[in-house]
Amino acid sequence: MRLQAAAWFAEGVPVVEVTGRLRVSRTAVYGWQQRWRRGGEQALASRGPGGSRPPAGRLPAVSSG
């Protein structure tokens, strides 16, 4: 999705149109556009799964049943 947006940014497609095509928020697309301007498509590559992560060095407790 972000890489498709990058292709459209390169073509000069306005942010509002990108949001409509991808059905995502303007905030998300403006963020992608800013990252794309700074680092190209590489800056939009996935950084792994989202969500909260435990602090470094601390793993959640596992129940033994």
Image (cartoon, rainbow, N blue to C red):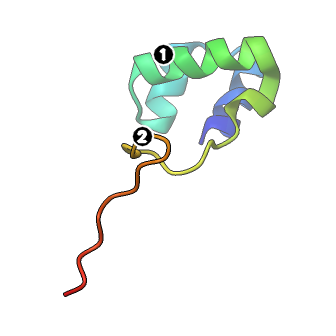
Q: Nearer the viewer, residue 22 or 36?
A: 36
Q: Nearer the viewer, residue 54 or 26?
A: 54
Task: Tell me whether circle 1 and circle 2 mark residues in contact (CB < 8 Å).
Answer: no
Can you say whether 59 is above or below 30 in the image? below
Instruction: Please tell me in which quadrant of the rendered image residue 39 appears.
Output: top right
* Residue under the point 41% across and 49% down: 58
Quarter where residue 3 is shown: top right
Residue sitting farthest toward the left = 65
Q: Which residue lies at the image location 58% right of the left edge and 49% below the top edge? A: 48
SS label for mark 2: loop
Residue 30, given in percent of the width and then of the height, sits at 53, 14
Residue 23 in the image, given as x and y percentages of width and height: 41, 36
Q: Hey, what amino acid is under mark 1?
A: Val
Where is residue 54? Give x, y as percent: 39, 46
Q: Residues within 10 Å of mark 1 (few under 14, many from 20)?
A: few
Residue that label 2 marks: 55
Above or below, 63 against 53 in this view is below
Between 52 and 49, the residue placed more toward the observer is 52
SS at badge 1: helix
- Which comes sooner in the sequence, label 1 or label 2? 1
Residue 22 vertical position relative to residue 13 in the rendered view, above or below:
below
**Which of the labelled discs sits on residue 6, or is there none?**
none
56 on left or right of 54: right
Q: Can you tell which of label 1 and label 2 is closer to the viewer? A: 2
Q: Nearer the viewer, residue 22 or 47?
A: 47
Q: Quadrant of the N terminus?
A: top right
Label 2 environment density (alpha carbons within 10 Å; few <14, some 14–19, many ≥20): few
Disc 2 residue type? Pro
Reply above or below: 55 against 39: below
Q: Quadrant of residue 4?
A: top right
Which residue position holds label 1?
Answer: 16
